[in-house]
Image (cartoon, grey):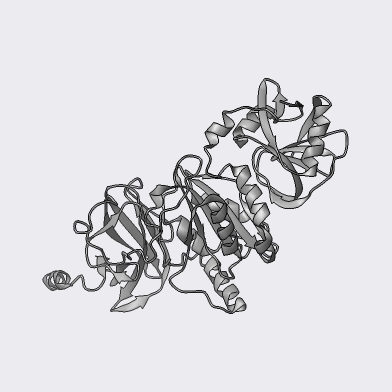
Amino acid sequence: MFLVACLLFTALPFGNFYSMRLSAKTGISVQMQIGKKKVTKKTFQMKAGTSRQLKVKALENKKSVRIRAVQYRSSNKKIVSVTKNGVIRAKTSGTAKITATVKTNRGKQTAWLKVNVVHPNQESGETPQQPGETPQREPVPEPSLPDESGEKILIAYFTRSGNTEKLADMISDKTGGTKFRIETETAYPQDYDAVLEQASEEREQNARPLLKTRVENMSDYGTVFLGYPIWFGDTPMAIHSFLESYDFTGKKIIPFCTSGSSSPQTSYASVRASVTGAEVLEGFWIQGTSAGKAQDAVSRWIDRLGITGENQSQRTAGSEEGKVKITAGNTVFYAGLEDNSSAKAFREMLLEGPITIRMSDYGDMEKVGSLGKSLPANDENITTGPGDLILYQGNSLVIYYDANTWNFTRLGKIDGVTRQELLAAFGNGDVTVTLSLT
């Protein structure tokens, strides 16, 4: 009997799927596929910077067995990482082993696959296309304008109704960056209710829709504007697919989004969680119905970010003339002022001489203190960032450490400051702050 079993095992072909391990006790085989293609080799080759969707299947007597859970693991995350949903990300040259542990009602089985990562510039003749490796369908043209660090600007966006694309057009006009539309392999329905139903199912399943378009030269871009509509209070799942397809380490990620009424804060947090190693800057949000009229607001937002094609370091290293000097203990910050009636009244107030105010903590995101007089308000729905100077209720100055979305009047912004630097300067509890014009 043992001899018969051995002969049967050695006679088993790899077939359409590559069966990594066969359970003698249950008779269930764990099989893998990458993308829509069936894997037929033990080693799968990928280029650094690319990603592929790995799926597993449990079979018994050629019939599918229901999988209760799958756990993926990489032997070397520096070479190849794999998400809990099976997205393989090739990072640098080398070989790593991906293991999938599959749990069914009959117990646990494992399967493995080696991934060989090669340099992205290797000639196609030396790197044959593997099953599941889809060539770029929409080449991305070279952008015309670098950002302040000398790197190129990408404006990647996902849209259904077209509202987010309107913002992408405005950002492209302002920065000269390259637009790139994120599209899924399977298009979403035209019917609004059907879209809601599909989006809800994707969120419940924590799905990662396969993408039809890909940025092959992502390493060229130092700044990535990321646009999307807010669905069910968060980013669409296609955005997760996009963010998990690239390595954004060292890049600037700038979200922009539209919605009916939902706040963007949850979506911003989702973006931050998906781009570890990147710097996520102040985002932009507006109601979808107002997206076509947002040109001025978008322009002011990008100006605050300092991404206008100029060299930011040259601007900040220059004269501080005309700025607001903010002194807290031995620390000094400089802030530029907005072009509105509120900021002009604030400047006139400081022309009379320095003012000293007592500022207190609020909500672990800001310092607030009374100005002693009321200024005209120019409230608009904005999302704050570290260093924003905000006029609240016409008579209070707020210095923000973090993001908050509300109807505020922006007076100005401290140049190039981080949350950590602000916390170090202002500390916990009350602090005395002196404001003056330079």
What residue appears at the point 62 percent right and 36 percent down from the top-left corner?
A: 419
Percent across and percent down for residue 168 are 56, 59
Percent across and percent down for residue 368 are 77, 36
Q: Nearer the viewer, residue 353 or 403?
A: 353
Where residue 400 sits, quadrant-wise, is: top right
Q: Which quadrant is the C terminus positioned in? A: top right
- Does 132 sit above or below residue 144? below
Percent across and percent down for residue 231 are 60, 65
What residue appears at the point 82 percent right and 46 percent down from the top-left corner?
A: 377
**Count of numbered circles on the image:** 0
Q: Nearer the viewer, residue 309 or 265?
A: 309
Q: Which quadrant is the N terminus positioned in? A: bottom left
Percent across and percent down for residue 105 are 41, 70
Where residue 250 sits, quadrant-wise, is: top left
Q: Is residue 24 visible?
A: no
Q: Nearer the viewer, residue 380 or 42?
A: 380
